[in-house]
Amino acid sequence: MHIPFPQETYRIKGSIRSRGFSLIELMVVVAIISILGMIALPQYQRFAAKAKLTAALSEVAGAKPAVELIIAEGMQGLGLSVPTPEQLGLPTAGRYCEQFLVGRTSDSLSIQCRVKPDRYLGTSVSLMLERGGHTPGWKCTTYLMDESVLPEMCRRSR
């Protein structure tokens, strides 16, 4: 025997569910990600610039033992000549330094690294390490306005 049921008993109230996200929810997520990106991108660029300058400084530091030896033996052994970067153990160009330059005064030697152009740092950034015969330690010099990207050694010598 077949008993007919009314159609209303089969439908459960509130059983219609939406699937996925609404447009407003997606727009809120995109807005949050955009705001986080606006905050994170400059921080990342600053971090990358600082890492590049630190790596460039370590390339220049490869010449420290040779300079220390020249100063220990006395600058008179050089005569009036200025050693070349190759004589100090530096390559013509490094991974982060496009050019190495060596300078000399009567009692000090300096090694300069012209940093390869960078969007954050610009095109004319250079780091210079200087070692004087009468002063202890090394001095790092650069002409960047943003001190937050400088390696620790260069911040201390300012």
Image: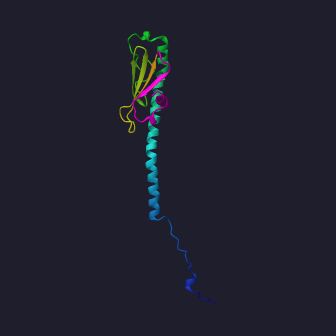
Q: Is residue 102 visible?
A: yes
| Residue sitting farthest toward the right | 1
Q: How is the image coloured?
A: rainbow
Query: Which residue sits at x=44%, y=34%?
Result: 147
Where, by quadrant of the figure, is residue 107 drawn? top left
| Residue sitting farthest toward the left | 123
Query: Which residue sits at x=57%, y=86%?
Result: 6
Tell which of 56 and 133 is nearer to you: 133
Residue 88, percent from left and from top: 45, 19
- Chain part drawn in magenta: 133-158
Tell which of 4 and 24 is nearer to you: 24
Q: Is residue 151 magenta?
A: yes
Q: Is residue 86 visible?
A: no
Task: Count the numbered circles shown.
Answer: 0
Vertical placement of residue 137 versus 95, above or below: above
| Residue sitting farthest toward the bottom | 1
In the rendered image, the quadrant that contains the N terminus is bottom right
Residue 22, percent from left and from top: 47, 65
Tell which of 71 and 66 is nearer to you: 71
Is residue 81 found left or right of 51 in the rendered image?
left
Where, by quadrant of the figure, is residue 124 drawn? top left
Vertical placement of residue 40 versus 124, above or below: below
Residue 35, percent from left and from top: 44, 52
Residue 40, percent from left and from top: 46, 46
Q: Is residue 56 magenta?
A: no
In the rendered image, the quadrant that contains the C terminus is top left
